[in-house]
Image (spheres, rainbow, N blue to C red):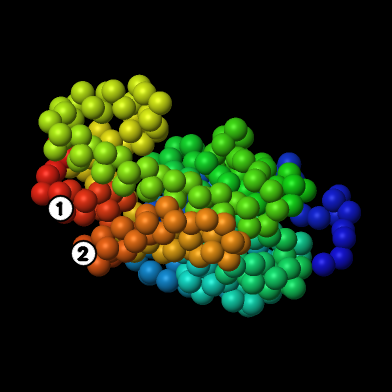
Amino acid sequence: MADVDDDTRNDCHGGDSVPSRIALLGAGRMGTPLCGRLVSAGHTVTVSDPRAEREAPVRSSGADWAPSGTIAATGADVLITVVPGPDEAEAAVPDAVFAALAPDAVWIDMTSNSPSTARELRKRAEAHGVDVLEAPMGGSPDDAEHGSLRLFVGGSADILDRCRPLLEAITTPDRIRHMGGPGTGYTTKLLINLLWFGQATATAEALLLGRRAGIDLTALHDTLAHSAAGSDFIRRDLPALFTGDYLRSYGLDRIHDQLKVITDEAHALGTPHELADTVLRIHARALDRYGPIDGELLAVALLEERAGTLLRP
């Protein structure tokens, strides 16, 4: 794509007086609250989702609805995709969607995408003169609603600067982290997930062993939380597990797919991945046992089942 002077390009926010025309593809648990925040910030948002039943909540947020991604994208300055994974991202943005955007438009992909899948989509977008920024999210639907998501941004620093005003309608400036060039945002999100799910399974194994050895779980939890082994998982998330809450906010099949992507990336890049393989294998067994249902801690449920013990104080 030819270089263009910054003062001749559309900003993501459309300048100080003209809000962006945004096409948002994906009106699920994350996309719908993000849509509401963008509308509240004064942007004109048109949403498309394959599920027709999502039209009512989208319209109630003040956004428009389009029956297809191409129609939603027509004349838009900014395209935002908030879909579950790589397959959905590829299906959401055929060439017709990129071709329908306004000149000098920007595509912001907030999907937990595969770096390899995104690489091919980025080439197609750039062939249509569309700039690309990846900004996968860390957080829950509640975080999306209240503007406290973390965004792991990969791509050009110049494009990020253009899009900061729009991203700051979604979250606070300190939660927008530029990780580097294309692919680094996706990889960062996947590494965070790998470590979190690894901590969850390792902690569960330790607690099951401690309980079998006769240690009170409440005392062990408090001791671990304030020790060198302490982590956000132990301090923040473990109490939910102790009440029987397996954090049913995300599908086990999606978790498995993301762990598979990052272990494949490690294999492709030639870095050690024995522990990553183990975390993936445990989640694959959990998926076989429970099926594609919601539950971020269902691998822990599998370990409890194998131990014949529930982690309840």
Residue 289: numbered disc: 2
Q: Quadrant of the C terminus?
A: top left
Marks 1 and 2: in contact by CB < 8 Å?
yes
Instruction: State the image coordinates of residue 232 (x, y, percent, origin top left).
Output: 39, 33
Looking at this view, is 149 or 145 the one in front?
149
Q: Is residue 53 above or below residue 305?
A: below
Task: Please name whichever residue, 179 or 303, is drawn nearer the observer in this view of the structure.
Answer: 303
Q: Nearer the viewer, residue 19 or 238?
A: 238
Numbered circle sitting on residue 112: none
At horizontal 33% and vertical 33% (from top left) the residue drawn is: 234
The answer to whether one can see residue 73 in this image is: no
Residue 77 falls in which quadrant of the image? bottom right
Q: Which mark is residue 305?
A: 1
Q: Which residue corresponds to the image point at 37% horizontal and 42% vertical from the top-left?
A: 199
Secondary-structure class at tag 1:
helix
What residue appears at the point 48 percent right and 46 percent down from the top-left corner? 192
Question: Which residue appears at 54% of the width and 64% of the height?
Answer: 267
Amino acid type of the residue tagged 2 in the rendering: Arg
Q: Is residue 212 above or below residue 130?
A: above
Query: On the image, which quarter does residue 128 sit in?
Result: bottom right
Residue 162, given in percent of the width and then of the height, sits at: 73, 47
**Label 2 SS:** helix
- N-terminal label among 2 and 1: 2
Picture coordinates of residue 236 (x, y %)?
A: 34, 32
Report x, y in % for residue 21. 64, 56
